[in-house]
Amino acid sequence: MTFGEDSRPLDRDAPDEASALKARKACINCRKQKMKCVLQGSSEACRRCRRAGLPCVFVPRANAAQLPSLSGTLDLDFKNNVLSRLKVVEERLSIVADGDMDFGAVGMFSAVSEQSPEPTPDGPLWNAIVLLQRCSPAVPPSIWQRDTIESLWSSFHDRMPGLHFMPDKQTFSTPQPILLASILYCSSSRGPPDVLEIAPQFFTVLCNAIAQLSIPSSEIGTPRESTVSQEEWAFQTVLGIVLAGLLTEGNIKETGNWIAIGYRLMLDYCPAHVDDTSREWRKLFSGIQIVDLEHSSIYLSCPVIPIEAPLPILRMSPLDQLYKLSRMMHTGLSHFTGRRLPTIWSCFQESSLSYHGSATSFTAIDGILIKDWAKQLDDWLQEFKGKMTEPDDQSSKLVLRQYVLHRLLVLSIYHPARSGNLWAHSITSNEQEELLLSARATLKLHQHDDSIWANWDLIMITWAALIVLQGLQGGVGEIDGKHYRICSVQALTVF
């Protein structure tokens, strides 16, 4: 998934688009942001101005802002200069190898002054940076250096995989503060060591920015219609919360509060009708629902988002695979939430002994439900395979990942109550064998799927590694034992 506006090289093999661009001038807004200005149909406003709710004004070239254009008439020396400067920054941060420069990220930084080492309010990206600075005055000023911000932004677009609930490209010419804060934290926390050390600072910025949504009339919590429409502000803000949730859903319990805020914003700002120019609100609802369910599964807490969206425009098709998985998980979790049972996350905490020492009563109904839940997951996987008319590696990888991780979760619901002990007296041999097989499948998934990065996924992989290592210590799985031991140790380093 790419967030940068039109972040792709110019396609010189598209004569229709190129001729359309040459046949007319760009409007003031698109020209200042150095973006393509595209008219659709008989509309007098370009696509970007219409989405942002801005007046679309065309002026003679002589009166326009005197900035180099990123269209086909771009001055070659200027282009090479920009590319060379970005290449130095990215090589310094080990983002890309020599010769792998992508011109697509340049557009977001076109309004940045070359001489200014600090962000200044002279472009949409830096307007958002200024707001983030104001809400986090205690963080070190060094994290706001221009080359740091630019490198984190561009590396996010270059390296981050897509979101499974919203695979289509999303573009933002005017990034809003919370979305930008999530991107900076994501890029720094998943980056090389020299930027990893500043990730805690950007996490503080992210928390402060989301907290602003609960403060009346705050700058970040109030849409500024002079730059974007209220709908666009809300969409970006909720998407930022979803991205933040994917990074913290397992180890930060307060993620549940963020989800509640995001859900409230969706209900308040989602349009009654959508068309080709509208954002993908239905897919965004699916995304926040997935984060909510995964967060709830780690803590065995009640989900915030209902399985059925209250607004018709947000409802998914009953035949959608993610909808079916969400409904299955929502129904299963509702049986175990609110009972103060030990959780997977409690096994990673120092205070976990207090949980394990408490009396936990599981019933025969619990056992039947868990078996049925696992069987439903098996059927869900088989149904997907039966519907595939053509092989799709990306979709297959996504569905297999969801199946393997969720099945391990379901089979592990009893396990924290046994102090995470694979050899507890209360575990049957069948339960032990099935849990070990599921944990090994999870480690194999981690070994062959390099696109895994979400916090919940990494926690489940770490959980699987602990189970497999415990099995090896007990003499179960000696065949390929060395292989599984290596995989388990590697998995323990990802979280």
Image (spheres, rainbow, N blue to C red):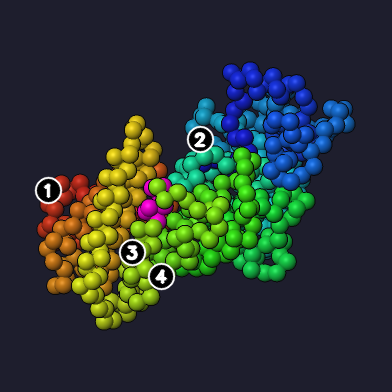
Counting residues from the N terminus, which is met first, the one under dot 1 or under dot 2? Answer: 2
User: Which quadrant would residue 263 be assigned to in this image?
Assistant: bottom right
Q: Which residues are magenta?
A: 320-326
- Decide: is 439 above or below 427: above
From the viewer's perspective, is the residue at label 1 or at label 4 nearer?
A: 4
Label 3: how many Cα within 10 Å (few below 14, some 14–19, many 20+): some
From the viewer's perspective, is the residue at label 3 or at label 4 nearer?
A: 3
* Residue position for label 4: 301
Counting residues from the N terminus, which is met first, the one under dot 2 or under dot 3? Answer: 2
From the viewer's perspective, is the residue at label 3 or at label 1 nearer?
A: 3
Residue 188, position in %: x, y? 52, 50
* Residue 305 appears in the figure: yes
Q: Secondary structure at mark 3?
A: helix
Q: Residue furthest right?
A: 63
Q: Which mark is residue 96?
A: 2
Question: Could you give the CA–CA distance between mark 2 and mark 3, rounded to whole angstroms?
Answer: 44 Å
